[in-house]
Image (cartoon, rainbow, N blue to C red):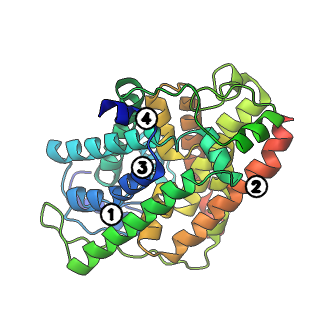
Amino acid sequence: MIELISQPWPWYIAGPAIGLMVPLLLILAGKPFGISSSLRHICAATVPAGIEYLKYDWKRIGLWNLVFAGGIVVGGYVAMHVLAFPDPAIAISDETVSDLRNLGVSNFEGLVPVEFVSWAGLATLPGFVMIVVGGFLAGFGARYAGGCTSGHAIMGLSNLQLASLVAVIGFFAGGLFATHVILPVLLR
Amino acid sequence: MSSATSELTQVPPDCEEIGGTPYSGGSVKVELRTLSAADASIYLVLGILFGVVLIKSEVVSWFRIQEMFRFQAFHMYGVIGSAVVVGMISLQLIKRLGLRTIHGETIEVASKPLGRGVSYVAGGLIFGIGWGLLGACPGPIYALFGAGVSVIVVSFVAALAGAWTYGLTKRFLPH
């Protein structure tokens, strides 16, 4: 059993498990599935700076979401250190490996490309753009769009919400642009 | 903050979702109550489960995201697609059967109107570029931090700065 759990989980286990977050949060907690609003709550709690968007009772509105986000951190630790992560490298397709090699990625071990996404990588231009610019745009865009992959792609689409479909198409178009236009220039 | 009334009046009128919470999936009407230890442990456990799934399915991996945006494997599409199918069926069942929360509250998930849709298109594109570069969205940022990718804390602070900057510039942006 523990061996099974230690393996990377196939999509048909992971996807339904993520989808079940929607009814579990609604029934057990009366809360809608979503993560990126936690960013707003933390801003409201720490540096509201008189900004209208950040002036609300974050404890009443958002404390649950912050506890949920804290749980994700713990879950990340548990998955990595308790349930073990046997594969030194993610088993991505050969085509992807070859494409990324052509872009200059040589280390395929771990969850992230350590040449760029690491403290040493942060000092390089590609690493800085991926870590800092990528993070900034993800935070800004998620709040501008009113949700991220969980809030729009999972919860919003589950709710058959046209606005979420538009946002998700935007997510995908933006990701394609980053992958096929920005990264080739950045990593060359 | 001296009374419940003043708490309510400090909610800005432009926070359209504040009846429920500021998020994207519609608003859920629940009786307001303070966060009890029992409720907090439910949120924590659900968060832990979600974090475990994110790591074990490798969807937090920059490599998997690259594979997805290059259309070179089914994995990510399978994860997101089956998550949406399960979420959709569950939500429709909850609505049709009129299920309540374990506290007996009614569950109402209101749809968010598209409006002009500019914020969804522009915000979506900006988010997508960030997602493509970093290879992680907010959920995976938390999970990666727990998994020991410590530099992701810089991305987290950058994402907070992004959310804060959105708040600062919101009234100048088309929505």
Circle 4: element type? loop
- Tell me if mark 2 has few (under 14), some (14-19) or many (20+) residues whose alpha carbon lies within 10 angstroms of its own: some
Q: Amino acid at mark 4?
A: Gln
Lower position in the chain sequence, tag 4 or tag 2: 4
Pointers 2 and 3 in contact (C-beta within 8 Å) = no
- Tell me if mark 3 has few (under 14), some (14-19) or many (20+) residues whose alpha carbon lies within 10 angstroms of its own: many
Pointers 1 and 4 in contact (C-beta within 8 Å) = no
Residue at 74% over, 50% down: A178
Residue carrying label 4: A7
Is B20 displayed left or right of A136 in the figure? Answer: left
C-alpha span from label 1 to label 3? 42 Å
Q: Which mark is residue A14?
A: 3
Residue at 52% over, 77% down: A162
- Tell me if mark 1 has few (under 14), some (14-19) or many (20+) residues whose alpha carbon lies within 10 angstroms of its own: few
Q: Amino acid at mark 1?
A: Thr
Circle 2: element type? helix
C-alpha span from label 4 to label 2? 32 Å
Is A41 displayed left or right of B95 in the figure? Answer: right
Residue at 19% over, 48% down: B39
Q: Position of residue A166 (x, y in %)?
A: 60, 71
Residue at 21% over, 42% down: B41
Q: Which mark is residue B9?
A: 1
Label 4 marks a residue whose chain is A
Residue carrying label 2: A177
Which quarter of the rendering shows the C terminus of chain A? top right
Label 2 marks a residue whose chain is A
Q: Position of residue B35 (x, y in %)?
A: 21, 48
Q: Which mark is residue A79?
A: none
Q: Amino acid at mark 2?
A: Phe
